[in-house]
Image (cartoon, rainbow, N blue to C red):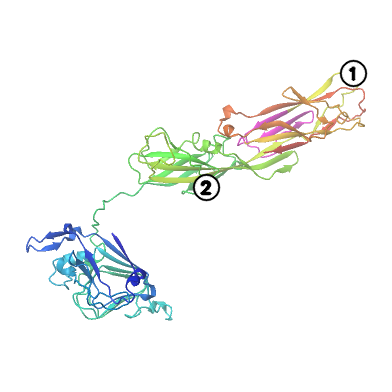
Amino acid sequence: MAVSIDRSRLTKANIKPDSMNIVFNFSDSFYKKDTKTGERLLDTDKIPYIIVNYYNFKSDRFKFGAQDGYFLGDSNHREFPGAINQLGTYIPSVKRYYAKSIATELGGASADDWENSNVLNFGSHLLNNFTDANDTDINSTNDPDKSGLTADTAAVSYNNRSKGTMLFGTMLVAQGSYYAGGPTSGLYVGGVVAANNITLNAAKISPNHDKAVFGTNQDFPGIVPTTPDPTIDSIDLNDPGSNNSQSLKSGGTAKFDYADGALKPAPSLGITGELKLSNVPDSYGLYYRYNRNGNNDKGDWRRYSDGAQTGTSVELDQESLLADLNNQTKATAGTMKTEAQKISYPLTKTSGIEFATTADAKAATIAADKIETTATFKFTLQIDASLEVTVPAKISFGTDILGHSSGEAIRTVAINEIQLTQKTVADTGAPEEPKVVVYNPLLSGFNLKLAYLDANATSQNPFYITGNFKYYNINLDKSGSLASDETNGEWIDGILKRDTTPQSLETKTENNGLKSNSLQLHLPYSNNYKVSSNAYTAPMGWQLTP
């Protein structure tokens, strides 16, 4: 049990306190009859551990007076001698009682008996914690280590005390020194711990004082020895090629990059994981929940695997856990970069996951406000990649498209999304058979657009004659003119496109497979084209947006 003594509250009731006695009152259930003498004695086996916290003494210190001490009281011994009113005036008319000696009530031969085993045992059950009392000369001495060396400067002190006023318990002086002076014996039973100096100036201590140090017997009543709590210590993560191995504590972030060339295409990733635990029981439950974008969404907890766990390590199935974790989050696109025949931007997916152990694994899911965890662990998974598109710079219809009265020439552009590693610019084909390749390992959303050609009524180049380059097709579906006569747009939207809705993020590849289109460009035959020995070509403009 803990008791607080606040000096600021005491001085409100008694402006000029010059002494203080602490009286312990125990109910009849704490007493027993001595089998030899028949006396009614305090039962040391029932004495609780008591911590007395002293507050707001600070530079006022705590100085035990000559008659201050620790005593026992009962229904007839509740008041202290020397009643004083708030003005500091002694009131002789107030009825006073004298408390009993702890030593004699425990079976000691006298009030100063500091060798009795029961008296020593009482001392080991009491801790006096002086939380903020400090030495008065701590700031005035040139050497702080030399402060608190007298009875008038030490944070806690006593000097020339009266016999029969025993002090009990370990003295813990957290911010100052301890001083004990005077030749009188039988004054103190306990130990001392001080932040600064401990001075014993002719002060005697019990020859058996070590038996009165707080907690010496280590038999704290009512406390049942327990095993350490379970902990999830770490998680080990590895990519498929073991190029990147990481061990994380709770709260850490694991980073994997497709540029390393070891990760598998989404959604599998190929990352393996293993949780390391300690102090777990023979059987326990393991649950997890995703924290999208690193933020706790307070969702339900889901049980990992079909039943209870039994060991200090758990291997994580990347297909059902880490891959799903990656799928929960939309990729964040970085700054667009355009090079010759290549458009790209970096991608980052950041997802959080939290694990928890429970006493059992009976429930398949547990609501966030219902779970009773025995250990928790969380980490962030960051996947870095890039979306890269290689595009043809121009298209050619050759030199033979002349002198025809009807018909048209067709060129087909193959546009394919891939997930294989693309470290250099992919094959864009020849101008007569151009190709577009979209490298998208994370299956991130994108929109690839094709530029309109500027119409020019005076041009004899077939690609620029107004209304001549009539239309294009995507997968043989007639769409519209490539040489726009209107000013309502410079780009043809959706030449190849992938949407990123919450549903598609959680869809497996087999349900939302790689995209491909066949773009057909049509050029009609005409006798009006300018005769040239050079091939008819036109530039191809491309735009990529997330």
Which residue is at a point 40% across and 46% down the rendered structure image?
A: 375
* Camera sees residue 131: no
Q: Position of residue 93 (x, y in %)?
A: 22, 76
Q: Nearer the viewer, residue 214 or 387?
A: 214
Q: On the rendered image, what quadrant is the N terminus found in?
A: bottom left
Relative image position of residue 335 (x, y in whole percent): 68, 45
Tag 1 secondary structure: loop
Q: Which residue is mark 2?
A: 253
Q: Amino acid at mark 1?
A: Ser
Query: Residue 479: x and y, percent?
Result: 76, 25
The residue depicted at 86 percent of the width and 27 percent of the height is 467
Mark 1 nearby-residue class (10 Å; few <14, some 14–19, many ≥20): few
Q: Which residues are magenta?
A: 414-443
Task: Decide: is 219 above or below 134.
Answer: above
Residue 274 falls in which quadrant of the image?
Answer: top left
Compared to 206, does 474 lie above or below?
Answer: above
Badge count: 2
Mark 1 — residue? Answer: 405
Looking at the rendered structure, which numbered label has been put on residue 114? none
Q: Residue at x 38, y 45 (%)?
A: 374
Residue drawn at (59%, 32%), measured in percent from left and top? 504
Picture coordinates of residue 307, whole percent (x, y): 38, 33
- Pick the residue in front: 417 or 285: 285
Is residue 211 placed above or below 485 in the rendered structure?
Answer: below
Does the segment drawn in magenta span residue 425?
A: yes
